[in-house]
Amino acid sequence: ITKLKISFPYMSSCPIKYLKRGNFNASPGQYVLLNVPSISAVEWHPFTLSDSSSLELHIKADGGFTRSLAELASEKIEVAIMGPYGLGLGLGMGFGVLRRTLHRRSDDAGAKSLVLVGGGIGITPCVSVLRGLLKENLGFNSIKLIWVVRERSTFAIFEEFLSSTIIHRPFVEVELYSTRPVKDLESVPSTGWT
């Protein structure tokens, strides 16, 4: 039995147990199919891995299945996982395809920049890719992550990771945008971000 970490925005993480069968080798950007028999024995839902090395998911409790899962967050439940699926960035070769692409396009004085753009909980694949890129040294001069959300409080989901990334890696820049106007700044939960 291995732990799968699932985090819900605005809630504490949910420890969920699952039975691990065989090797689980994932690349940044890949996803898994998740089934929770106590919710439905036949429903499988796709979720992008937030961290492919530690099997971590961030799930927004937005629909029927995800709301039911969030309600079970305080309980230990069994889940089934299939995957990982999708090519991801690694393609099973460590960032080989991206590395070759960068090599071909680095004729301009070796300048290598990358921009990752995500919206709402859709930032998850970008965070997974960013984590993977920071583990591999591909020689980027700059990496920019742009994240657009409705509510400023959503930024708290990856606040710790993004803060530590920016502090320790000056070549990483993060731009955060909130589309919903804030009428009363006093009522907005503080995330420490501006």
Image (spheres, rainbow, N blue to C red):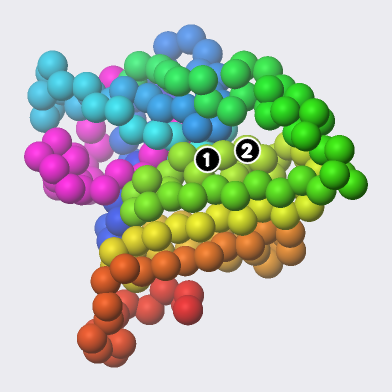
Q: What stretch is highlighted in magenta?
A: 55-80
Q: Which mark is residue 72?
A: none
Instruction: Tell me what residue is drawn at x 46 percent, y 40 percent.
Output: 125
Q: Pointers 2 and 1 in contact (CB under 8 A)? A: yes
Q: In this picture, is 1 found above or below 185?
A: above
Q: Quadrant of the N terminus?
A: top left
User: Where in the figure is residue 107, as x and y percent of width and height?
Assistant: 86, 38
| SS for dot 1 | helix
Q: In this picture, is 116 found above or below 102?
A: below
Q: In this picture, is 124 found above or below 102?
A: below
Q: Residue 132 carries which label?
A: 2
Give left or right: position of 29 versus 104.
Answer: left
Q: Name the residue under label 1.
A: 128
Q: In this picture, is 113 found above or below 192?
A: above
Query: Which residue is at the far front?
Result: 108
> Magenta includes 49?
no
Give left or right: position of 189 versus 95.
Answer: left
User: Where in the figure is residue 144, as x and y percent of width and height?
Assistant: 61, 56
| SS for dot 2 | helix
- Mark 1 residue type: Ser
Give left or right: position of 88 versus 37.
Answer: right
Instruction: Tell me what residue is drawn at x 78 percent, y 34 percent.
Output: 105
Q: Distance between the residues labelled 2 and 1?
A: 6 Å
